Image (tube, rainbow, N blue to C red):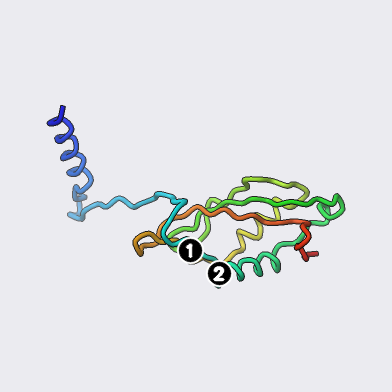
Amino acid sequence: MHSITTALLIISLFILSVPNAHGQTIHKTDTTVYTIVESAPAFPGGSKSLTGYLQAMVRYPSTAQKEKIKGRVFVSFIVEKDGSLTDIRLLKELGYGCDEESIRAVQAMPCWEPGKQSGEPIRVKYYLPIAFGMDSDKRK
């Protein structure tokens, strides 16, 4: 059994480092998405800048205001190795236009500083709550 395991390991290492037709070694790109990292991704300027961005960019939809809707929309996205945002998703919806407004604001964000592991940029999943109609919410 041990010799079979060793043989499979040697074969897999050989397959992963096989040169292509041009004599170049093929390296697999790490597409792992991390949730816990040494250095978390950051909005340009840090958390205070993120708060300022959300206050300036996100508008409390008139339908939600009329219905006195209060709460948070939770959005997730992946901060890519280059800082771009992909795979933007709603995790907790509020309705009345708040969900669409949250997605719009995240899609319009500038690139972030990517997360890092051992000094190398990596893909990191980020979770962001966006408040609507809360006491501290000064948006109109």
Q: Name the residue under label 1.
A: 83
Q: Residue 47 placed where, x, y %?
A: 58, 67
Which marked residue is nearer to the observer: mark 2 or mark 1? 2
Q: Is residue 29 left or right of residue 85?
A: left
Q: Residue 100 placed where, x, y %?
A: 70, 52
Total labels: the figure holds 2
Q: In this view, does 108 lie to the left or right of 39?
A: right
Q: How far apart are marks 2 and 1 (CA)?
A: 14 Å
Label placed on residue 112:
none
Would you call the spot at circle 2 few (<14 residues within 10 Å), some (14-19), or many (20 or more)? few
Label 1 sits on a secondary structure element that is loop
Q: Residue furthest right?
A: 66
Q: Is residue 45 left or right of residue 55?
A: left
Label 2 sits on a secondary structure element that is loop
Q: Is residue 4 above or below residue 138?
A: above
- Badge 1 amino acid: Gly
Q: Mark 2 points at which residue?
A: 46
Task: Report the residue at 16% width, 27% height from top.
Answer: 1
- The residue closer to the viewer here, 124 or 36, is 36
Task: Report the residue at 45% width, 53% height from top.
Answer: 36
Task: Report the residue at 55% width, 53% height from top.
Answer: 77
- Badge 2 amino acid: Gly
Task: Report the residue at 51% width, 54% height from top.
Answer: 78
Would you call the spot at circle 1 few (<14 residues within 10 Å), some (14-19), or many (20 or more)? many
Q: Earlier in the sequence, mark 2 or mark 1?
A: 2
Q: Residue 22 placed where, x, y %?
A: 20, 54
- Which quadrant does the C terminus fall into? bottom right
Q: Residue furthest left?
A: 3
